[in-house]
């Protein structure tokens, strides 16, 4: 059976991957909300907008989140649950924080379903890598300042055999750097970035609990970020933005600093 990758009505026996946005339920897309309301079963993460679960009072709700150093449901078991419930003829929604395809392991879940013959749908979400800085007033690109941004995961320490990142080269890419899941390794990450050529006084912003009532922003420099985060007691989840835009104050940009458009 061929199923559109996005369609307004869920079909029994399928899995729909729903990106839930950065946390505030108001930032879940309309399509995502519609899918939740139609679901028979919802497998949800701890960073998903949990308030929207109330929109599906009859659905079975299964918590499958991963808490750093705590509760943990193996990805293999999550894959099995998706397939089991879909094969039972249920309309299955996999609700995640952010976007399913940005460090959400949505691709792996799609592959597991496809291997089992279970059709998959996708509803994109607002990724926290963009929404978090935006809600803090930090544009990831800004004309005449930076022309791109790079999003990376910091959950594996630099130098770890599992790391696939070259932090020294990232320091030379000339784009805003957005680091997700980097709280535990920020000291080594910042050291490697400076070793790669980024100035010690490069502005850094750390956004905690993005979009939620207790959202806060810590501003510092690359040389001081590890100490500043430790002193502030920063814990996951947090988004770290490295680059000139992290020091940009949109409310107090002087008129003479604004340059006329040249394109």
Image: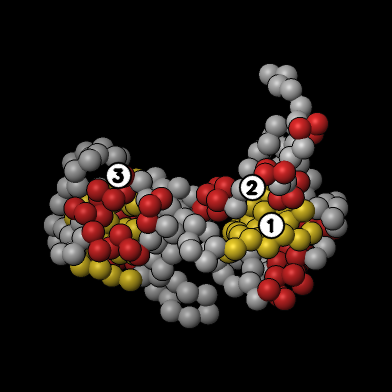
Q: CA distance from mark 2 to mark 3?
A: 27 Å
- Location of the C terminus by quadrant is top right
Disc 1 secondary structure class = strand
From the image, tell me which residue sits under label 2: 138
Tell me the residue that label 3 is attached to.
31
Residue drawn where x is 44% and y is 59% of the image: 23
| Marked residue nearer the N-terminal end (2 or 3) | 3
The image quadrant that residue 256 belongs to is top right
Residue 1 location, quadrant: top left
Whichever of callouts 2 and 1 sits on the residue coming sooner in the sequence is 2
Q: Is residue 48 left or right of residue 68?
A: left
Q: Is residue 149 above or below residue 147?
A: below
Residue 253 location, x and y as percent? Answer: 74, 40
User: On the image, numbered disc 1 is attached to which residue?
Assistant: 205
| Tag 2–tag 1 contact (CB < 8 Å) | yes
**Up/down of 209 relative to 132, above or below:** below
**Residue 26: % across, % down:** 38, 52
């Amino acid at each position: 059976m061929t199923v559109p990758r996005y369609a307004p009505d869920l079909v029994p026996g399928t899995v729909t991957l729903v990106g839930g946005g950065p946390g505030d339920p108001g930032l879940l897309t309309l399509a995502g909300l519609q899918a939740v309301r139609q679901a028979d079963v919802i497998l949800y993460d701890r960073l998903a907008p949990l308030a929207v679960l109330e929109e599906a009072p009859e659905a079975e709700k299964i918590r499958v989140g991963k808490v750093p150093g705590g509760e943990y449901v193996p990805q293999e078991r999550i894959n099995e649950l998706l397939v089991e419930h879909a094969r039972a003829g249920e309309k299955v929604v996999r609700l995640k924080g952010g976007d399913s395809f940005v460090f959400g392991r949505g691709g792996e879940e799609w592959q597991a379903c496809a291997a089992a013959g279970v059709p998959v749908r996708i509803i994109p979400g607002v990724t926290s890598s963009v929404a978090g800085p935006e809600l803090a007033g930090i544009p990831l690109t800004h004309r005449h300042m930076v022309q791109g941004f790079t999003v990376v995961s910091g959950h594996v320490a630099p130098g770890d055999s599992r790391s696939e990142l070259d932090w020294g080269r990232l320091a030379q890419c000339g784009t805003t750097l957005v680091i997700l899941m980097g709280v535990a390794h920020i000291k080594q990450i910042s050291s490697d970035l400076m070793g790669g050529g980024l100035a010690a006084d490069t502005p850094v912003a750390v956004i905690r609990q993005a979009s939620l009532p207790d959202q806060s922003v810590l501003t510092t420099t690359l040389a001081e970020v590890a100490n500043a985060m430790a002193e502030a007691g920063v814990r996951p989840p947090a988004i770290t933005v490295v680059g000139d835009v992290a020091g940009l104050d949109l409310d107090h940009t002087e008129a003479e600093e604004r340059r006329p458009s040249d394109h």
